[in-house]
Image: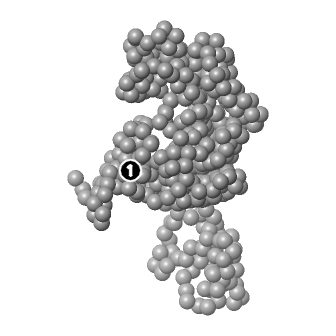
């Protein structure tokens, strides 16, 4: 095998796509700043106990682990940035009121979490700490929608779920942790046969509810079915009311559709309430899931300061794949030279935000990746920009 062959699901990003990703990164971080979110940059590597405490088994399996040659302690390469941002909020900033934080950086996965995925996503996200009301949930969904619109997408669907529906079904049952984990996995996979088997020996109402949940996806009518057929109680009623309120607020946004999938439990170890996904696509293409988020009030507890929290994340590398290829950036072609007037003219153009590509000697006929539609030429002792003649 060649020494320069990359590991599976790891790839270089070449100039055109890299420029597109960078443009998206800037646009989406500017969008978050417009909502009042402050940028933080957590480290790529941390002590393993800090990185994984309280995050659940799934994230531990996704995390690359190594030993620090300086201290001998176990280190991890982050597979998700959310726990790190929670640590910053709880341990470093330690603010009393609402804190809004955003981030963008690479994460590494020991294994892919979806077909044709990358093990090195470029994760961008936002977190809102300190407010327990649904206003925070709504704000992070609105920011996620605004982010996708800033990327150029207009066909958006928000899919809502709530982990409390399952919590109420299993409340009070003496189940082994591995059994609970298998139930969650079967619900996420909508595996009716597995749920039927796992539900054997459970109270009839619990068994029926577990088998019902995978069928509860679609429009607002699924909330009515859940209210009628799931085990009633204050937690169930609150979860359904929260989803109804959020759906009513989101339905008022132009170009946004709302749906429900009450068995969607991906990321169960994080979430404590409403969770959501946002699907999007350019015109004429089937929408795909681009954003995941929700409420996770327990995430800061392991750092000594449990606060209400809601947020979302997306992968910029995944997002760029569903967008139209942008046009090449217009640029100015200039001759190479050491003459003071030429160098001054090039400097002024670059200071004004123009891209100026100097043609090095002997490379006058090469094609570059920029769209050089103008040329810097000398006319009457002055350097001026003129349209480039093909």
- Can residue 117 be seen in the rendering of this structure? no
- Residue 273 sits above or below residue 220 on the image: below
* Relative image position of residue 112 (x, y in whole percent): 39, 41
* Relative image position of residue 9 (x, y in whole percent): 37, 46
- Residue 239: which quarter of the image? top right
Counting every numbered tag in the picture gives: 1
Neighbor class of circle 1 (other Cα within 10 Å; few <14, some 14-19, many 20+) is few
For numbered disc 1, what is the local secondary structure?
helix
Q: Quadrant of the C terminus?
A: bottom right
Q: Measuring 51% from the left and 66% from the top, which residue is drawn there?
A: 368
- Say left or right for 303 vs 328: left
Q: Measuring 55% from the left and 53% from the top, which residue is drawn there?
A: 90
* Relative image position of residue 181 (x, y in whole percent): 41, 28
- Say left or right for 352 vs 205: right
- Residue 72 sits above or below residue 141 on the image: below
Q: Which residue lies furthest to the top in this view?
A: 204
Near-viewer residue (63 or 235) = 235
* Relative image position of residue 34 (x, y in whole percent): 71, 55
Near-viewer residue (297 or 127) = 297
Residue beneath disc 1: 49
- Residue 327: which quarter of the image? bottom right
- Residue 350 sits above or below residue 317 on the image: below
Q: Measuring 33% from the left and 47% from the top, which residue is drawn there?
A: 8
Q: Measuring 64% from the left and 47% from the top, which residue is drawn there?
A: 130
- Can residue 386 be seen in the rendering of this structure? yes
């Amino acid at each position: 095998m060649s020494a320069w062959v990359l590991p599976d699901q790891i790839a270089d990003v070449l100039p055109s796509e890299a420029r597109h990703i960078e443009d998206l990164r800037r646009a989406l971080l500017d969008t978050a700043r417009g909502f009042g979110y402050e940028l933080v940059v957590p480290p790529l590597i941390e002590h393993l106990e800090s990185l994984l405490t309280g995050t659940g088994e799934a994230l531990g399996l996704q995390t690359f682990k190594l030993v620090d040659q300086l201290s001998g302690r176990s280190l991890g390469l982050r597979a998700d940035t959310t726990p790190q941002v929670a640590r910053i909020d709880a341990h470093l900033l330690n603010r009393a009121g609402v804190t809004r934080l955003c981030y963008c950086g690479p994460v590494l996965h020991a294994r892919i979490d979806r077909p044709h995925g990358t093990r090195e996503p470029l994760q961008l996200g936002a977190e809102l700490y300190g407010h327990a009301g649904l206003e925070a949930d709504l704000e992070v969904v609105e920011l996620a929608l605004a982010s996708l619109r800033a990327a150029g997408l207009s066909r958006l669907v928000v899919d809502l779920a709530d982990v409390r529906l399952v919590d109420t079904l299993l409340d009070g049952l003496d189940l082994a942790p591995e059994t609970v984990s298998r139930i969650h996995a079967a619900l996420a996979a909508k595996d009716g046969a597995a749920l039927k088997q796992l539900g054997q020996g459970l109270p009839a109402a619990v068994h029926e509810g577990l088998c019902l949940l995978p069928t509860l996806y679609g429009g607002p009518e699924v909330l009515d079915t859940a209210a009628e057929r799931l085990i009633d109680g204050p937690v169930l009623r609150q979860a359904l009311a929260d989803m109804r309120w959020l759906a009513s607020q989101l339905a008022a946004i132009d170009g946004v559709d709302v749906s429900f999938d009450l068995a969607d439990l991906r990321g169960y170890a994080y979430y404590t309430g409403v969770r959501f996904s946002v699907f999007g696509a350019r015109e004429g293409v089937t929408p795909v899931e681009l954003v995941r988020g929700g409420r996770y009030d327990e995430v800061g507890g392991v750092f000594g300061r449990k606060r209400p929290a809601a947020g979302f994340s997306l992968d910029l590398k995944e997002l760029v794949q569903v967008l139209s290829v942008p046009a090449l950036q217009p640029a100015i072609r200039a001759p190479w030279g050491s003459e003071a007037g030429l160098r001054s003219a090039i400097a002024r153009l670059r200071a004004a935000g123009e891209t100026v590509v100097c043609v090095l000697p002997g490379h006058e006929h090469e094609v570059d990746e920029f769209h050089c539609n103008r040329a810097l030429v000398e006319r009457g002792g002055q350097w001026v920009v003129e349209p480039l003649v093909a």
